[in-house]
Image (cartoon, rainbow, N blue to C red):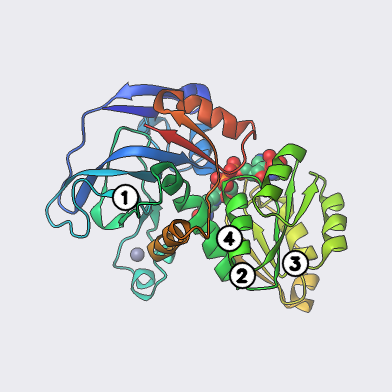
């Protein structure tokens, strides 16, 4: 079978199509003919050599978390799916034994990790991580959902976003950003989003963004947000200086959920404004398999339309990563092996 592999960690030019042995499912596993696999900035970190998870000894490395396709074979003990089923993978990997797994939610597992291997014609996965797809949800749409939408969904719930709330999404045009905008609307909330690109912001407005701010300047963004209102919640996947910004603009008692560090891994915060304003800052990673199930249902019911910027053939996976690196896209980038 063919796979798109990282052969060096210098960036998109390090992606090559390679031949690999067809995987065979072991006990509890299933193989999936991959119809679609979305990419995430997590994969780009790996490709740029900026992830502790993968180094030169691991090459060639096949990434790809968000797999959708058709089950080809199942190993012993797999229940719930059978060959021929259309499915989407929940990429969570948990130990099932630690205190956090027992008490839940499962994404707090102390040995939490993620599936990698979807950028290939066949993926070998844990059978009980597969969710059957309703007829109305095509593979590319399903592949767009797991990482970006589960993460945004979980963050919105951690921030207790509800009807009438105002949600601030710095960087509203990418995978998690667009998901946060669309899911805020599902929760009945209004959104403020930022981008450095007027045309991308316009597209996100069409997807439901209520207030767009075209700027990269922190002080300019701060003033523009203040003119709109005091956000009840901040969905922060950028980290860096957007952290202090988010903390300063949110209302008394507001919550900022953080899941990423695209704009930097460190920030200072205004401690007095944090305690005097009774504000909360919470870390959040991925979501639960049940979240994914609900997101697939929302999509099947037409309440959510996951946004795909463009689909790429497996041999063009390098171009898919270049598009992400060049900040060209709105929503998800999907590879179709
Ligand atoms: N913890 C978790 O479970 C989890 C899960 C998913 C994602 N994440 C993290 O969340 C972040 C977003 O992931 P993603 O897949 O949604 O990425 P993505 O699609 O590449 O995000 C693109 C967005 O980020 C903005 N952006 C890109 N580079 C920037 C920079 N240097 N400074 C400011 N804004 C920048 C873009 O703004 P423009 O419109 O201006 O181009 C765009 O809105 C990543 O850090 C990722 O690792 C974490
Ligand atoms: Zn665990």
Asked if residue 10 can be seen in this view, the reply is no
Tell me the CA gap for discs 2 and 4. Answer: 13 Å
Rendered view: 72 above or below 98: above
Residue located beneath label 2 in the image: 159
Secondary structure state at the residue bearing disc 4: helix
Ranked by sequence position, the earlier of labels 4 and 1 is 1
Residue located beneath label 3 in the image: 231
Q: Nearer the viewer, mark 3 or mark 4?
A: 4
Q: Quadrant of residue 164?
A: bottom right
Ranked by sequence position, the earlier of labels 1 and 2 is 1
Seen in the image, is 296 located left or right of residue 323? left
Q: For mark 4, does the 10 Å Cα neighbourhood hold few (<14), some (14 to 19), or many (20 or more) residues?
A: many
Tell me the CA gap for discs 4 and 1. Answer: 22 Å
Q: For mark 1, does the 10 Å Cα neighbourhood hold few (<14), some (14 to 19), or many (20 or more) residues?
A: many
What is the x, y in percent for residue 274?
75, 72
Secondary structure state at the residue bearing disc 3: loop
What is the x, y in percent for residue 248?
79, 64
Residue located beneath label 4 in the image: 183
Seen in the image, is 139 located left or right of residue 74? right
Q: Which mark is residue 87?
A: 1
Ranked by sequence position, the earlier of labels 2 and 4 is 2
Q: For mark 3, does the 10 Å Cα neighbourhood hold few (<14), some (14 to 19), or many (20 or more) residues?
A: many
Tell me the CA gap for discs 3 and 2. Answer: 11 Å
Rendered view: 305 above or below 110: above
Tell me the CA gap for discs 3 and 4. Answer: 16 Å
Image quadrant occupied by the N terminus: top left
Q: For mark 2, does the 10 Å Cα neighbourhood hold few (<14), some (14 to 19), or many (20 or more) residues?
A: many
């Amino acid at each position: 079978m063919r796979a798109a592999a990282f052969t060096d960690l210098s960036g998109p030019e390090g992606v090559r199509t390679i031949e690999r042995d067809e995987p065979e499912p072991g006990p509890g596993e299933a193989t999936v003919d991959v119809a679609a696999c979305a990419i995430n900035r997590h994969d780009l970190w790996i490709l740029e050599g900026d992830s502790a998870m993968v180094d030169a000894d691991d090459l060639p490395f096949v990434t790809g978390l968000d797999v959708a396709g058709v089950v080809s074979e199942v190993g012993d003990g797999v229940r719930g799916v059978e060959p021929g089923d259309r499915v989407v993978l929940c990429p969570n990997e948990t130990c099932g034994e630690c205190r956090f797994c027992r008490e839940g939610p499962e994404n707090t597992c102390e040995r939490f990790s993620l599936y990698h291997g979807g950028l290939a014609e066949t993926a070998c996965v844990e059978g009980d991580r597969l969710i059957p797809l309703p007829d109305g949800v095509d593979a590319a749409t399903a592949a767009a959902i797991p990482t970006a939408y589960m993460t945004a969904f979980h963050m919105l719930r951690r921030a207790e976003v509800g009807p009438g709330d105002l949600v601030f999404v710095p960087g509203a045009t990418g995978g998690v950003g667009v998901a946060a905008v669309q899911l805020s609307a599902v929760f009945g909330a209004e959104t403020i989003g930022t981008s450095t690109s007027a045309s991308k912001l316009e597209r996100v407005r069409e997807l439901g963004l209520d207030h767009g701010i075209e700027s990269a300047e922190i002080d300019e963004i701060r003033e523009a947000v203040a003119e709109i209102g005091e956000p009840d919640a901040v969905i922060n996947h950028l980290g860096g200086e957007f952290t202090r910004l988010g903390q300063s603009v949110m209302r008394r008692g507001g919550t900022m959920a953080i899941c990423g560090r695209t704009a930097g891994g460190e920030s200072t915060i205004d401690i007095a404004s944090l305690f005097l304003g009774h504000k909360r800052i919470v870390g959040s990673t991925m979501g639960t398999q049940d979240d994914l199930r609900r997101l697939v249902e929302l999509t099947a019911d037409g309440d959510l339309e996951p946004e795909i910027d463009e689909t790429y053939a497996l041999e063009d996976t390098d171009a898919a990563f270049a598009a992400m690196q060049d900040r060209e896209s709105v929503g998800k980038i999907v590879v179709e092996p």
